[in-house]
Amino acid sequence: MKMQGCQQAYQQMQNVTENPRQTEYRLFAQVTAAMMKAEQQDHAEVVRAVH
């Protein structure tokens, strides 16, 4: 299985096993990380992170 295939399989299993609170926490962490990364980049990266 290629790395991308493994990641997709992991994400599918994660979606099945996590409850709504876990999903919300994970999503919040991903958005926060993207915004922190975008803060160091140009305007387009900030727009992508927020969108």
Image: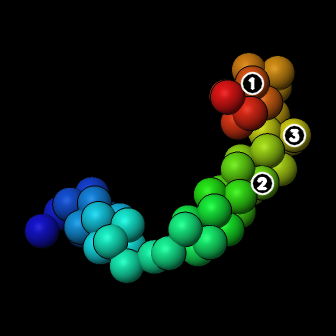
Q: Amino acid at mark 3?
A: Glu
Disc on the earlier residue, 3 or 1: 3
Q: CA distance from mark 3 to mark 2?
A: 11 Å
Residue farthest bottom in this picture: 17
Percent position of residue 34, x then y = 71, 47
Would you say 7 lies left or right of 34 here? left
Depth check, mark 3 against mark 1: the one in front is 1
Percent position of residue 7, x then y = 32, 64
Task: State how the image is colored.
Answer: rainbow
Q: CA distance from mark 3 to mark 1?
A: 10 Å
Disc on the earlier residue, 3 or 2: 2
Residue at the image position 24 percent from the left and 67 percent from the top = 9
Percent position of residue 10, x then y = 31, 71
Confirm whether residue 3 shows in the render: no
Residue at mark 3:
39
Residue at mark 2:
32
Would you say 1 lies left or right of 18 here? left
Q: Quadrant of residue 28?
A: bottom right
Q: Is residue 18 above or below residue 33?
A: below
Residue at the image position 37 percent from the left and 79 percent from the top = 17
Q: Is residue 25 above or below residue 46?
A: below
Label pair 3/1, CB-CB below 8 angstroms: no
Residue 47 is marked as 1
Confirm whether residue 51 shows in the render: yes
Residue farthest left in this picture: 1
Residue at the image position 67 percent from the left and 28 percent from the top = 51
Point out the image quarter for the N terminus. bottom left
Q: Amino acid at mark 1?
A: Val
Q: Is residue 50 above or below residue 23?
A: above
Q: Residues within 10 Å of mark 2 (few under 14, many from 20)?
A: some
Label pair 3/2, CB-CB below 8 angstroms: no
Residue 2 is marked as none
